[in-house]
């Protein structure tokens, strides 16, 4: 029985690989290589402390796409964040459309490079799920940080571009994606394959640590 199951499993894998390769052959070479790479290049492993201590904001990206599977992985990490009373007040808008991304710079002049990224995730708070009155901001911030750490651990580059609490940006991004009034855009996370890898910086500062009570 085990041998039969093993043979069946191998047949399923071979069929899936054949379908992937066949589909890739009808696309331009760049897309074909990208499709094949998904089979043969595993997601790089990185422990939590390494991801936290080496993560840097990345604002320049290659032309390589970020797959739907990778985006789903990032969203899974985001939704694994803690939240007050497990309220999970987050909502996410995945944006790939180039015309839409080209408008980001007009809403936040510090995020114009979003037009060069393959994908962005607009991270929002849903006030209808904010049952503890105001903790949505902390909850959704934790989800945003998880996206950044997961992206770095997966070999991607990402940066948190701020929206909340600036009212003009909130209204602008809400209009950009057609979100209702109960949805508050908190951040736009710009994601891609990094053109360069900024060196880690040790930001630990002893004077910012206070033991037991505040010390000058």
Image (cartoon, helix red, strand yellow):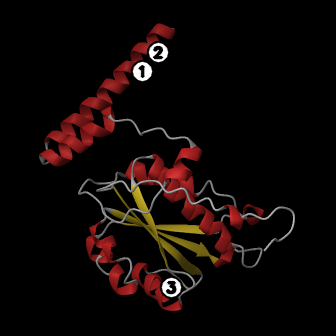
Q: Which residue is mark 3?
A: 170
Residue at the bottom extreme of this rendering: 168
Q: Find disc 1 in the rendering and name its residue.
A: 9
Residue at 33%, 35% (x, y): give it. Answer: 41
Q: Is residue 87 visible?
A: no
Q: Give me the disc on residue 28.
A: none
* Dot in front, 2 or 3: 3
Residue linked to disc 2: 5
* Identity of the residue drawn at 47% across and 86% down: 169
Q: 108 or 180: nearer the eye? A: 108
Marks 2 and 3 sit apart, C-alpha to C-alpha, by 54 Å
In the picture, residue 210 is in which quadrant? bottom right
Relative side of 165 to 7, left or right: right
Q: Is residue 51 left or right of residue 113?
A: right
Place of residue 134 in the rendered image (x, y in percent of width and height, measured from the top left):
72, 78
Estimate the spatial distance between the alpha carbons at disc 1 and disc 3, rounded to whole Å.
Answer: 49 Å
């Amino acid at each position: 029985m085990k041998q039969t199951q093993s043979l069946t499993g191998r047949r399923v894998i071979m069929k899936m690989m054949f379908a992937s390769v066949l589909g890739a052959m009808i696309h331009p070479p760049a897309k074909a290589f990208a499709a094949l790479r998904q089979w043969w290049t595993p997601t790089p492993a990185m422990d939590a402390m390494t991801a936290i201590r080496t993560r840097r904001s990345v604002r320049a990206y290659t032309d390589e796409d970020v797959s739907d599977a990778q985006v789903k992985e990032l969203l899974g990490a985001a939704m694994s964040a803690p939240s007050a009373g497990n309220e999970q007040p987050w909502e996410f808008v995945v944006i790939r459309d180039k015309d839409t991304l080209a408008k980001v710079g007009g809403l936040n002049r510090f995020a114009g490079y979003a037009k060069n990224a393959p994908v962005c995730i607009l991270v929002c708070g849903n006030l209808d799920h904010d049952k503890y009155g105001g903790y949505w901001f902390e909850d959704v911030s934790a989800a945003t940080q998880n996206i950044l750490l997961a992206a770095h651990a997966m070999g991607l580059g990402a940066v948190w571009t701020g929206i909340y609490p600036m009212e003009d940006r909130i209204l602008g991004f809400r209009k950009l994606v057609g979100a209702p009034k109960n949805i508050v855009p908190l951040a736009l996370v710009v994601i891609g394959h990094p053109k360069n890898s900024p060196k880690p910086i040790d930001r630990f500062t002893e004077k910012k640590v206070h033991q037991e009570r505040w010390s000058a």
